[in-house]
Image (spheres, rainbow, N blue to C red):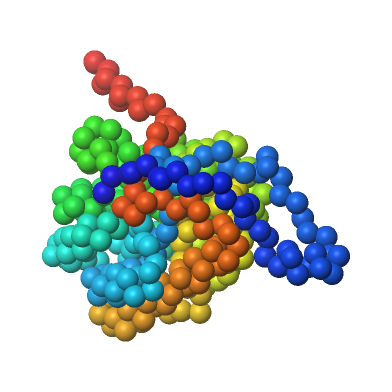
Amino acid sequence: MTDAPLSSPGPAAAPRRPGAAALAALGHPVPVRDPADTSPHTFPDGGTWRTEIPSVEGPEALAAVLTEAAALDVPVHRVSQGSGVWMLTDAEIAGMADACAAHDVELCLFTGPRGTWDTGAGTRTPSGGAGPRARGHDALAGCVEDAVRAAGLGVRCLLVADEGVLWTLHRLRTRGVLPADTTFKVSALIGPVNPASYAVFERLGADSVNVPSDLALEHLTEIRRVSRAPLDFYLEAPDDLGGYVRMYDVAELVRRGAPVYLKFGLSRAPALYPYGAQLRDAAVDTARERVRRGRLVLDLLARLGADAGMSPPGSRLPGPLSRFRDEPPPAPERS
């Protein structure tokens, strides 16, 4: 799965705003797009957007996604899982990795334990405490164990919800403990909400960053002024992330936020994490519906004349990004 150059299409008409012609017939003013708001960045293949199906929790859900994507002609660049590497057997992980490779789809698995499932009482208080972050050395070590195990089974994208885990895994990548082509995706559970924090995640090793779906379009323009790291964005967010449905923003989201992964989430759906066989029917049914939501978004982009710029199938790498310098640990002092 290597990035390939896009073909060179001829000049295309500028995408239109939803309802613009009908409103113009009434003399209703339509906002004019400011070219300065357009992101100057793309994926290394020249594309401005890719697709992602989240909450693909196991082999059966993955099979449903691949079947439905073929039936509805929905190109899928990445599928992601939320329960974690530790909730899958070696055979399940290897099977999912093989199936994704056969369909030129990137598989992204969540790493390790997180605070919301831990024994700390703070996460169950109104403040949420430390939230999903890894509590203590053992949780960090569990995430590292998950990452090394998944990489050994052919997984090349890992989902993280802790800054320390991200930096640790990035350092392991630079040292060759994890394959050099491993990518790290920051979870929506800790998504940054301002450009400075977004840039910090990039420098800690993130290859794509999920921001909350309640950010205004102007916020995406602000992020693009400081970082070119790919953006992950739920066009429809799960209820526990707000339940936002922002399909009509998709063309502006691509224009301002490129390069961006368009995530086809699902509101009004059962919670699946941590997944097990008791949730099989819900996982498979919601997987199919997420693909259908993707078809609705792709159709909308086409109607608006904004469907150009999709990365070729199989594209997965983010291109060069800015990183903090990894300083070697200081030598121990002699007594």
At 13% from the left edge and 65% from the top edge, which residue is drawn?
A: 91
Side of 327 relative to 176 (left or right): right
Quarter location, residue 271 = bottom left
Q: Residue 152, how many percent across, how many down? A: 16, 50
Residue 167 appears anywhere in the view: yes
Residue 176 in percent (x, y) is at 21, 35
Q: Residue furthest front?
A: 10
* Residue sitting at the far top: 334
| Residue at 50% from the left image edge and 62% from the top image edge | 234
Quadrant of the snapshot with the C terminus: top left
Relative to 304, does residue 310 appear above or below in the rendering? Answer: above
Residue 44 place in picture, x, y as percent? 40, 39
Total label count? 0
Q: Residue at x 38, y 69 (%)?
A: 73
Residue 280 position (above or below residue 150): below
Report if residue 241 is visible in the image: no
Please say if 278 is above or below 244. Answer: below
* 257 relative to 62 in the view: left or right: right
Q: Nearer the viewer, residue 243 or 248?
A: 248
Nearer to us in this view, 269 or 327: 269
Residue 99 in the figure: left or right of residue 38: left
Q: Which residue is rendered at x = 24% and y = 15% of the image?
A: 334
